[in-house]
Amino acid sequence: MGSMRHWWHNKTAIRRWRTSIFWALFLSFLTVLISPVVFGSFLYTRMSSSMVENVNRSNTAMLEQVKQVVDLKIRELNQDIVQLSYNPKLDWLLRNGDNAKSAKDLYKFIEYINELNHYRLVNGTLGNFFIYLANTNMVLTPKVKTVAEDYFKLSQVYQGMEFAEIKETMLTGYHNRTFLPSVTISNQTGAENRYIPLIQSLPMGEVEDIKGSLVLLIDEQHFNDLMKQIESASDSIIYIVDDNNQLIMTTNESTKPIDQVLSRISSGFQTFEDENDGVMLLTYTSSSENGWKYIAVTPKDKLMSKVNEMKVIAFAILLVYLVVGVAACFSLTQRYYRPLREVVASITSGKHKEQNTIVNELDFIKNTIKNSFEEEKKMRTALHLQAPVIKANYLIRLIKGQMDIEEEARRKLESLGICFTSEAFRIILIDIWDSNDHLDGSRVGDSTLIPFIITNIGSEILGDRGYIVELDSNQLAVLINSDTHQERQSSDTETFIAELRGIVERRYNIKITTAISNFHLGMDMIGHCYREARIAMDYKMIRGEGTNIAFEEIKDLERGHYHYPHELETQLLNLAKSGDFNAVKKLLEDLFVLNFLTRSVSPEMGKCFIFDLLGTILKLQNTLNLSGKVLFTEGEAPIKLIMSCNSTTEMLERMKELFHLVCSYFNEEKVDHSDRLYNRIKQFIDANYEESSLSVIVIADHVRITPQYLSNFFRKHSGQTISDYISRLRIERSKEMLADRSLTISMIAQKLGFSYDIGLIRTFKKIEGITPGKYRELIDGN
């Protein structure tokens, strides 16, 4: 009876515990369900003002985005104006264009138009541009030079504007990057586009003596695309006005509200009454760079109509939400209560029933609890094995200055066995160059073992004076911590480098380049030491492999600019195009001596010089229309090819090889071109020598060269003049025709292109020594 009472008591206690947990879960789900309803009801009362504020923030954010993009494009346009305005040829045309009478002076117009034609503006918003020369009343474009009146009447027609108005508005007076309202322009094909003119008076910076204007036409469509984001998102009308409140462009068909809008602008946003559209919400921002204002006007009625529509929908959804939510709460409570009870029972008993497979999340939790202790043991073992890697990682971070030197960091370093005996530190960077062959003919082996070998040797030499760690596959860093006495520091460093270099070069035939920083006090200066060593290592390109470079030696060097002016590049291009490799080689050697031996050029400037030379080679490659695969193997980057060289001497030799290859291609190109031209000339003459109209001018026209060049070229390749060659062809043909007695000499002369038979007779006698008649008699006699 007592046992029955005890069992019933336990069963009742479990039932109460279960009931309390069950209802706690159920009430929790209900709270989660009802909370959005309560907050939603509260937030609904503020929906109207929130919608207005959201529209304002959205419009402001998008206006700011449009402003930043437009400001960026205007800065790019200003850069384009500077590049176009400061052209020396343009300056000459502005000042001397009206005096250009000679052919040489007029040719300068053609040269400048060609430059404009090749000029590519990077700003994608630019539709077109032209330059107006006031002294000659001419317009220069990338395609043509023409009289200003003809240009604006035929090529670029401004709708609603006569030439006098265009000249008064855009081409007269001083304009310093002045924007005008957008205009509609139609071209010769009748296509119409809207553009925003941007005007700069020329010469740039001259206020009184204006000699012309540079006009950039900005495609309005680019700005429209930006503003359509705001217009479509909030049914807003967008305006852009300049600092003089002049309307630059708008998305509204009618600009009638602009005056009312401008009068309402103040800080932030506000509402105002419009006689047609009712209450309007106004948002604007302005640019600090050019004073432009970006304005968005949104009808409030359209905005609130969406709120009212959502009101009815919200109530219907709320009812469905409550009904479905209560049922879901009850179902979820039952579902999540059952695994909770089993997990608690499993943890309380401390025993787990083994199962072959994990069926659900509960089995996963049980197995996780069981295996947690085993995982902890495995992690401890893994951490112990990774201790050297962790130590190396901490050293690398310390050397590169990526660690905050605080008391906690010092304790972590000490726990890893990284301790320092003084506050004096120096960094030595070691760059490895492996020749692969041991002195006795054997090989070191896998190249990845080389840093390991040097690390072990360096650690033995260092002892407790510092640490050595691998940074990259071919670079090590030595952190030296020694006596604060400067002379002893230098002596210890020199001894360490000498011993290390002697062992690795003598025993393993490995050359190393070392870069040494100055000594500095304090752990927080270790990163500074590393940066000094990096700067010194950059001079490896100039000093070469296997050298020892101290920051102390190069810190006071004057960082001069390299010498490679445009004239020398032009000379190098011309020599290469002529195929004169010996002259190219001499010029390259002079340039390298001048830049790397007779002047102090920093590694950065040295790399820029090498890039410029590589750019010259690429220009020659483009001139030849060669594929990149001809000079550089497939997948080979030209810059990496040059920068993989270990010294300037190697770079010079590589440059010589590339220029020698280019000169060879140019020589082949010249020979092939001459042979093709000579064969074309002969083929044309052979096909048309019987024509009376055949002449040097006709032949030159056909092959598209000048008559003078044709005559000299043909004489050089054939050893005879074109007239002699034609005459011999005609005489050989006449000898065949003389065998036919039905043809008279006059008829033969006419068929062979002679005007009279006397011409045939004279030419025949000059070449054959006898007259055609006598030749015919000889044929009959034979």
Image (cartoon, rainbow, N blue to C red):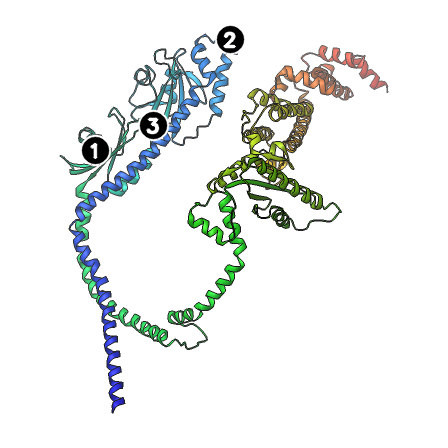
The C terminus sits in image quarter:
top right
Q: Is residue 442 above or below residue 119?
A: below
The N terminus sits in image quarter:
bottom left
Q: Position of residue 302 (x, y in %)?
A: 19, 43
Disc 3 marks which amino acid?
A: Tyr
Q: Is residue 429 left or right of residue 209?
A: right
Does the rendering let one see residue 50? Answer: yes
Measuring 39% from the left and 29% from the top, which residue is drawn there?
A: 76
Q: Secondary structure at mark 2?
A: loop
Find disc 1 in the rendering and name its residue: 267
Q: Position of residue 73 (x, y in %)?
A: 37, 31
Whichever of labels 1 and 3 marks the residue nearer the N terminus, that label is 3
Real-space Cα separation, disc 1 to disc 2, in angstroms: 62 Å
Whichever of labels 3 and 2 marks the residue nearer the N terminus, that label is 2
Real-space Cα separation, disc 3 to disc 2, in angstroms: 38 Å
Report the number of discs. 3
Question: Which of 437 and 741 lies nearest the eye of the viewer?
Answer: 437
Disc 1 marks which amino acid?
A: Ser
Find disc 2 in the rendering and name its residue: 102
Disc 2 marks which amino acid?
A: Ser
Real-space Cα separation, disc 1 to disc 3, in angstroms: 31 Å
Find disc 3 in the rendering and name its residue: 195
Q: Nearer the viewer, mark 1 or mark 3?
A: 1
Q: Secondary structure at mark 1?
A: loop
The answer to whether marks 1 and 2 mark residues whose Cβ atoms lie closer than 8 Å is no
Question: Which of 236 and 516 lies nearest the eye of the viewer?
Answer: 516
